[in-house]
Image (tube, coloured by chain):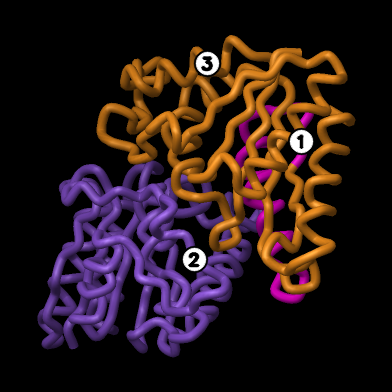
Chain colours: A purple, B orange
Amino acid sequence: MKVLMVLAHPRRASLTGQAAEAFATAATERGHLIEWADLVAEGFDPVLREADEPDWNDGCKVYSAETRQEMVRVEHNDATVMFFPVYWWSMPAILKGWIDRVWNKGWAYGEHKFPQRRVWMVGIAGTLTDAYRKRGYDSAMQTLLDVGILDYCGVAERRVELLFGSIEGEPYPTEILAAARHLGSAF
Amino acid sequence: MKVLMVLAHPRRASLTGQAAEAFATAATERGHLIEWADLVAEGFDPVLREADEPDWNDGCKVYSAETRQEMVRVEHNDATVMFFPVYWWSMPAILKGWIDRVWNKGWAYGEHKFPQRRVWMVGIAGTLTDAYRKRGYDSAMQTLLDVGILDYCGVAERRVELLFGSIEGEPYPTEILAAARHLGSAF
């Protein structure tokens, strides 16, 4: 499968970047072909402007050139995997804006559904699973990302995975990399 | 009270912009003083880069000039109100990035808590309350925004309000404006 790896961290060498690399390496060993979309490095602009506002009366609106270019990049692949650090129990703005702009009406939902069958999201979380569970952040994230975005856009093979403890010291960072590798092997 | 009105829509004349104006007018009649922060028009960059990454070993990190400028703008006011269109059961990237960058460690949480006692978030939702309730989007949003951001940052007088039906036709847009006015009078 051709896989678009969307990375949403300002440093490629970050733990998030390393986890994405571990995933990609394992997926490559399985025979998948990786194309990288390193959004911050590429200078992607996450601000949705008027040209990318959905038109509720026109299901075939032609969006901005940058948005259409991202749509083409998705269409050239069979699957998408997003790796991001969890900021405020959600994605960083750069990835939120990639969704806001590119996963647009008439292409990802509405007249047409998202053009790929398989999309995974992998969030690298700073703290531990108990801290998330205590406040219900984990299930709220599943509701908004898995149900609210992936299922809403008709993605059949979807998965939202959180890997916990990036700022909690060892053994967590090592475990995160191992889990990312494992996910890549299972892709 | 001096109130920073943060607007996160590409068109000031949008329903979200009109609702923010209605809120501001009512709040002004109550004696509040409004300062506008129209993030898209001002060209705010929502991408968190290395200069704004929190340092987990240094609670007093000095962030980028643009981020510090936004912090000063908050500090010059007594309260903040954010008006935004709900994109994907969350804020648009421009506002998410304002939080990502400005509500940073050592200023909004950690060594210091957010410097204001009162912060409200008002989201203008496209569809109706039943559609949100059916999937649990409304309670997930309360968990992530009210508990996960405002309460986490020690905001004592906080409120996350969703006004529904912006794309459902009348009477909803009119009701949204009335509700925004009502919120402004109650601020």
Q: Which dot marks residue B22?
A: 1
Camera-side residue of A165 and B9: B9
Q: Which mark is residue A54?
A: 2
Q: Nearer the viewer, residue A182 or B184?
A: B184
Is disc 3 surrounded by few (<14), some (14 to 19) or many (20+) residues within 10 Å?
Answer: few
Q: Amino acid at mark 2?
A: Pro
Looking at the image, is A185 positioned above or below residue B33? below
Magenta stretch, overall SS = helix
Q: Are marks 1 and 3 on the same chain?
A: yes
What separation in Å lies between label 3 and label 2 (alpha carbons)? 32 Å
Q: Nearer the viewer, residue B20 or B55?
A: B20
Q: Work out whether mark 1 precedes mark 3 in sequence or the reverse, and give the earlier one.
A: 1
The answer to whether residue A79 is above or below residue B101 is below
Which picture quadrant has residue B7?
A: top right
Q: Nearer the viewer, mark 1 or mark 3?
A: 1
Q: Is residue B117 left or right of residue A75?
A: right
The spot of residue A36 in percent (x, y) is 16, 65
Which kind of residue does numbered mark 1 sit on? Answer: Ala
Q: Quadrant of the C terminus of chain B?
A: top right
Magenta residues span: B133-159
Number of numbered discs on residues: 3
Residue beneath the point at 42% across and 79% down? A60
- Tell me the quarter of the picture where residue A114 sits: bottom left
Locate the N terminus of chain B and report the quarter of the image it occupies: top right
